[in-house]
Image (cartoon, grey):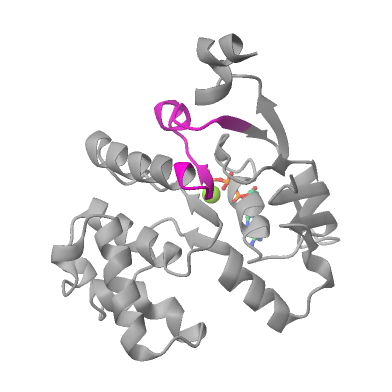
Amino acid sequence: MVPVIRTHGLGKVYSPGTQAEVVALRDVDISIAPGDFVAIMGPSGSGKSTLMNLVGCLDTPTAGSYLCDGIDVSTLDPEELAVLRRDKIGFVFQGFNLLPRMSALENVAMPLGYARVPPGERTTLAREALAAVGLAERESHRPSELSGGQQQRVAIARALINRPPILLADEPTGALDTRTGEEILALFERLRDEGHTVVIITHDPDVAAHADRIFAMRDGEVHEEPGIGNRESGIGQAELS
Ligand SMILES: Nc1ncnc2c1ncn2[C@@H]1O[C@H](COP(=O)(O)OP(=O)(O)OP(=O)(O)O)[C@@H](O)[C@H]1O
Ligand SMILES: [Mg+2]
């Protein structure tokens, strides 16, 4: 199976050659298969968001390569990259990034404007996406009229509206209480079971324990924690083999 996310020697240096130079990522080799649920952990400043931004094609590396679903993204021009991002990647930003003057429904429908979907269809699809995260009753609420967990779910519905195979989320439960966080995690697990690849950044070991694989970051380097994720560690796995 072709990995949906594959990096070779990926590196990122901010402000290279200046006094402000920061080596944020060094020599990262990761391979993530379709349907994997991965958690990225590590201390503040270890490079988690830097890696996520590269995988989400929001930034470009200074070394190495990244293949998204088998496509070397460095070979794409800006327009092709925008199309790849639109079709393959849903990004849930830390702090939601919802537009305050728009309703939940309008926020969710927004990416469809770029995908040239006719307006009538946008509303139908956005309603479906809101219903999928349990917010059908809240479509006309603005972000300020929603709880933190509900805002997070709107952000997830927006990231999923184009049905991207890859869902990336930077601290999706960071601002939530334990129970609301569990609801978001249950949603991610369902998406994983439907075949989406889910990658989340988290500081919380209890959150990471829901993932199938855990990548630990330190000083820009990534190491996979052997067999502590959900699926790999269970006795069930040993019994199968
Ligand atoms: N745009 C930038 N310009 C310069 N340096 C940056 C930039 N973005 C991040 N850095 C530096 O790169 C390093 C990695 O940052 P990154 O944001 O990836 O950390 P993180 O692991 O996501 O941390 P946190 O848990 O605090 O969000 C840090 O030392 C940071 O100061
Ligand atoms: Mg970060």
Residue 19 percent across, percent down from the top left: 78, 58
Q: Which stretch did the figure color magenta?
A: 193-215
The answer to if 208 sits in the magenta stretch is yes
Q: Which of these two is toward me, 35 or 139?
A: 35
| 159 shown above or below 189 | below
Residue 198 location (% of width, % of height): 52, 47
Residue 230 horizontal side relative to residue 95, left or right: right
Of residues 161 and 106, which is closer to you in this image? 161
Quadrant of res 146: bottom left
Q: Which residue is found at the position 72% from the left and 47% from the top?
A: 3
**Is-magenta flag for residue 201?**
yes
Quarter of the image where one finds residue 69:
bottom right
Q: Residue at x 40, y 26 (%)?
A: 206
Image-based side of 225 in relation to 113, left or right? right
Visible residue check, residue 234: no
Q: Nearer the viewer, residue 24 or 113?
A: 113
| Residue 147 position within the rendered picture, expressed as x and y whole percent measured from the top left | 18, 56
Q: Residue at position x 74%, y 47% from top?
A: 25
